[in-house]
Image (cartoon, rainbow, N blue to C red):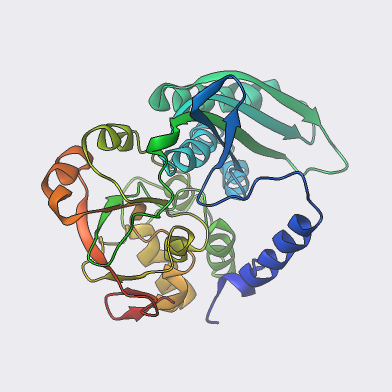
Amino acid sequence: MQWTYAKAGVDIKKEQGVVKALSAELSRKKELKGFSGLLELPFDAQHLLAISTDGVGSKVLIAAELNKWDTIGIDCIAMNVNDVYCVGATPIAFVDYLALEKPDERVAAEIGKGLEEGARIAEVYIVGGETALLPEVVNDLDLSGTCVGYVRKDKVIQGEQIEIGDLVLGMRSSGIHSNGLTLARKVIEGAELSYNAPFPYKPGISIGEELLTPTRIYTEVLELLKRCEVHGLVHITGTGFLKLRRITSFGFDIYDPLQPNDIFKFIQELGNITDEEMYRTFNMGMGFTVVIPENEEREAIRITGGKIVGEVVEHGKGIQVGDVKVL
């Protein structure tokens, strides 16, 4: 069987329809352009509040299979903080939401360890949260959260400055992060593999442990924003490289992509997945992308440790990754 995200149960087009239907009924809303909502503060004319919300998704099912809960809190912080970075904002506070099928103090404590570690890495404070027992709604548990940050109005980055010829800098991912796990799980389970089975690319590591590698928190972006001119920021999450379309209608030629992590090679071979589907679903080794003018190349690489993977091209060119036409 040739697996796709839709066959695994996640149809992106249908999901977009749900978002449109929901948004159509909302009048008290601010248009979201980019990865975080921005809101004016009545008491501060110079700054905007940046707000992002997201969850760990079906990665919790891997944690349940391994009974290993001490890292998904990092994922929860990361998914939100990285989105706040994308508008040029500095994250400052976080609240979590933990929904449980049944009370389990040990699991809660382990999740707390991950949240604490994620907050430490991102240098944010966890200022509150909510825990709910929902035995008729939730199987095992669900974990999500919201991050708040701030940015000067004249420092907001939403892609308007992007122009043809700008360079695309790619920053490595730590692995699958917290996206595409539904497809990954279906492929692995369809092959009748155990999550406790050895991961063939890394001796001593199980498949499940590799999938639970925490999402990278891209703290380097804050230093980059201080020292370099930045035209666009993209957190590569669900829908993979299609996320580049969120900041501009210009095209992208990713002529020298980062090498995909071993987990992606494993999933692709096991699931007979096309290159196009892989780049439309996973981060493929590039968890965060920065668009910069050409003259900032050397300093941006020094600060982030990333590399130039491509450039911005004219409208209508879509998104090309090597020989793969993603869009």
**Front-most of 53 and 273?**
53
Q: Is residue 326 left or right of residue 112?
A: left
Please report the residue visible at 72 percent of the width from the left and 25 percent of the height from the top.
130
Please state the horizontal and vertical placement of residue 219, each as a whole percent of the image. 34, 33
Please report the residue visible at 41 percent of the width from the left and 58 percent of the height from the top.
283
Q: Is residue 51 left or right of residue 314?
A: right
Q: Quadrant of residue 185?
A: bottom right
Please state the horizontal and vertical placement of residue 19, each as a whole percent of the image. 70, 59
Q: Is residue 150 above or below residue 214?
A: above
Please report the residue visible at 52 percent of the width from the left and 38 percent of the height from the top.
80
Q: Is residue 277 above or below residue 108?
A: below
Please state the horizontal and vertical placement of residue 272, each as a whole percent of the image. 46, 78
Quarter of the image that includes the N terminus: bottom right
Q: Residue furthest right?
A: 136
- Residue 197 appears anywhere in the view: yes
Please state the horizontal and vertical placement of residue 304, each as a whole percent of the image. 23, 41
Quarter of the image that includes the C terminus: bottom left
Q: Is residue 246 above or below residue 158?
A: below
- Residue 217 appears anywhere in the view: no
Q: Is residue 100 left or right of residue 117?
A: right
Q: Residue furthest front?
A: 45
**Front-most of 30 and 149?**
30
